[in-house]
Amino acid sequence: MKRFMSVIALSIFIITPNISCTSDDDILATYKTGQITRGEFTKWLTAGNYPRKLILEKKDRQKNKLQQMILEILIISKAKEEGFEKSPDFKIYIDRTRQSILRKWYFNDIWDTLKYNEPVIKAKYILLNVNRFKEFPGKLEKIKLNNSEIENQYNEKISLAKKIIKILDDGGSFDDLIDKYSSDSKKESDTKFITYDIMPEAFSDAAFKLKEDEYTREPVKDRKGVYIIKLVERAELTEKNIDDIFNEEQRAAGIKSRLIRKYTKKYLDSLLTSKGNQFLFKGELGRDDDIIFKANNKNYTVSDFKKLLSEKLTENEKVKFKNNMPVKERNRILKDYFEYEVWSKDAFKRGIDKKTEYLNDLEAKINFLLMNAYLKKLSTRYFYISEQELKEEYDNSKDKLYSTANIDTEGKPIKKEMSFEDAKDQIKGKLTEKLRIERSNKWKKQTLEEYNFKINEALLEGE
């Protein structure tokens, strides 16, 4: 009997399809001119940074995202058909996007190969706080102390700090003195490794000079007050041991991010000042043949910069800066121009522009620009809103339309109902946005119907 039951069980196992088995080639949706496979859907979710695991738990979520995906595909296709990407301004936006994406993946490549060696310490301290305001019990009111009053406090705290140091010299317990005097208790059990730039400069200057178990022999003055610091432990932080030294994941990530910024800047500064690279601009554009910077042993002149502005500014920007570009804006563009000419060569040398991640990211961002440009065209077509419609909307919502220009004696805003004339532009904006959304939703529905978009629900995952 047992043998008979085993055979039945084995037969059921063999003939029952494995419904959980999925393939990248599964066709999840079809439309008039194409289809969406599971692999393409997964790639789209990843490129958009969507929470894939969460979406795959529910079929409704997948249906919504598949609908969004097909609309994006169709919008981008229509934008290309209408020649959006061929317009001069759009080419400028693409060029800026390409530069931005190249910079992103170049920096990622630097981070992946970054080596660093950073001293870190554990330190406990006694802080004798200096107050800068006088407070009154039971009142919120505070009065700012003058410089003389603050300086008197510092003198008192320094005098007390010297007495505490004398107690330590005589064998006193640092932890006991923390309990007795410190306004910010930091015992050994509370201490964590810190890098130099985490604490105030005066604190770090003193603390990082100490040897283990040594304390500061003179009070350390800082904006917050007066410190007495004792070094507990010293270590060298590298990219290999950072997770061990900062064993809290969130804290380790924060320190790592800070170090990455610091050492990336150090790397770039070194690159920008290396042989063959020099920023020569002194604040004023001179003759066209004046050299403003050198990048990779090539001279760049005022004439080159003017050409860049003529080629890289959109028509709206040219109108905006027709009379005169603000000096700050001009200098920013010039500095970015110099830096790009330097670091882009390093990026190309590393092969960043050939990497799949860069190319996929660039394609996604350009498609996003195309989609936005096309949707903007749809949404900015003229909406006619009659005076009667404006008045009806005003009557329905005037209790929510008020100004708060005046303040009462207690400092609270006084609500004053807005007149129809004062509220007209606000109402028109609200109705225009409402019509824009309605038009967009109608267009999406019609487009899905026009392209006969259908989802194969049987192949969707989850419930």
Image: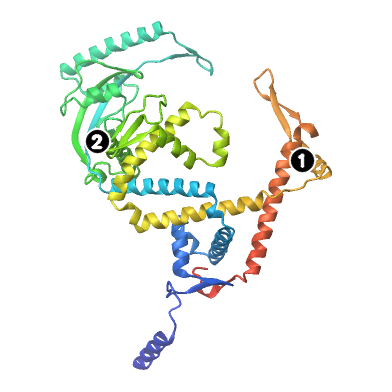
Looking at the rendered structure, the kind of residue marked 1 is: Ser
Position of the N terminus, as image quadrant, is bottom left
Question: For the residue labelled by badge 1, is the local secondary structure a helix, a strand or a loop?
Answer: helix
**Nearer the camera: disc 2 or disc 1:** 2
> In this picture, is 170 found above or below 23?
above
Instruction: Measuring from the top left, give residue 347's x and y in whole percent.
Output: 31, 47
In the displayed structure image, the side of residue 67 where residue 180 appears, left or right: left
Crowd around label 1: few <14 · some 14–19 · many ≥20 (10 Å)? few
How did the renderer colour the structure?
Answer: rainbow
Which residue has dot 2 on it? 274
Instruction: Measuring from the top left, give residue 346's x and y in whole percent.
Output: 29, 45
- Residue beneath the point at 69% across and 59% down: 442
- For marks 2 and 1 on the same chain, the one whose residue lies earlier in the sequence: 2
- Disc ID at residue 397: 1
Looking at the rendered structure, the kind of residue marked 2 is: Ser
Instruction: Measuring from the top left, give residue 451's x and y in whole percent.
Output: 62, 69
- Disc ID at residue 13: none
In the displayed structure image, the side of residue 434 where residue 117 appears, left or right: left
Q: Quadrant of residue 43?
A: bottom left
Asked whether the viewer can see residue 251, the reply is no
